[in-house]
Amino acid sequence: MKSGRDSDRNVAVRSYVKMILLRSIALFAILFLIVGTIVYPSFMYDFAGIISFILVLVFLLQFVVLYQLKNYSSKEITTVAVLGAFSAAARIPFASIPSVQPCTFIIMMVGFVFGPYAGFMVGAETALLSNFFLGQGPWTPWQMLAWGIAGLVGYGVSFVRNPRAQFYVFLLTGVVYGYIFGIIMNLWMWLGFVRPLTFASFIAVEMTSFPFDTLHALGNAVFISLFAPKLEKILKRYSLKFGVFLDS
């Protein structure tokens, strides 16, 4: 049998390898952009969609590695997986209603209660899993990023200590994030399919999506108003009962 010291050493080695991989991916992406720009001066402009797609993937991979470096327990990893599946399943029945989905509020609440890493991973998993039913495409990594950030934003609200103010800040944040989510997804559309890449063309894309972003924001407000206090109690009770994410 391995001693505790050998086990700790193996964990340290694995963590070191993961960190090297993390930095190597980032370095490769930077070198790719530099060489591409030197060889082909208009590289960044002509291939903005592909470049942004690669950078989003690199960011997602880096966050996954950081998540693994946290050495969460099997209970915590399982909790994240189950919540991601639940959030994805909650999105599917609302697919016929443009931009209205409960998953944004669910992801924010996970980040609020369980911390930034859990929130981001549940958000990324939501997009990846639900798109197996709704359709995968180049938009999937951008949705993973947008919903992952929703988890980080939810964690940020946890720093508001006044319980009454906390709810209203969470509600306002959910409404605002409906528009931020739209901006992130509009970046994907703008960089990949719109030419010329000007401020005016981006504003035009924003204007076309504004009604849908508003529906997203209003949907978040409704779901938060109806279900946020109950979901918060459920997640906190689960955390205490099973001892998961107690230090988040």
Image (spheres, rainbow, N blue to C red):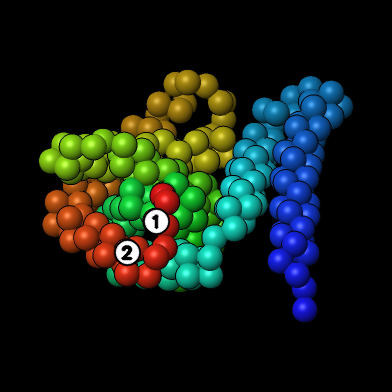
Residue 189, visible in the rendered structure: yes
- Which of the pair 85/207 is nearer the observer? 85
Residue 121 x, y percent position in the rendering: 49, 55
Residue 157 x, y percent position in the rendering: 30, 39
- Find residue 24 and report its image quarter: top right
- Amino acid under disc 1: Leu
> Residue at 57% across / 30% down in the picture?
195
> Residue at 77% across / 73% down in the picture?
2
Identify the residue position indicated by label 2 in the image.
240
Task: Check residue 41 in the rendering and tell me which mark sits there, or answer none.
Answer: none
- Amino acid under disc 2: Leu
> Residue at 45% across / 28% down in the picture?
202
Q: Which comes sooner in the sequence, label 1 or label 2?
A: 2
Quadrant that contains the N terminus: bottom right
Classify mark 2: helix, strand or loop.
helix
Q: Are marks 1 and 2 in contact (CB under 8 Å)?
A: yes
Identify the residue position indicated by label 1 in the image.
246
Residue 44 x, y percent position in the rendering: 70, 28
Q: Is residue 85 left or right of residue 44?
A: left
Total numbered labels: 2
Q: Residue furthest right?
A: 39
Classify mark 1: helix, strand or loop.
loop
> Residue at 75% across / 32% down in the picture?
30
Residue 69 x, y percent position in the rendering: 63, 52
Q: CA distance from mark 1 to mark 2?
A: 7 Å
Residue 88, visible in the rendered structure: no
- Find residue 184 and report its image quarter: top left
The crowding category of the residue bearing disc 1, from other C-alpha atoms within 10 Å (few below 14, some 14 to 19, many at least 20), is few
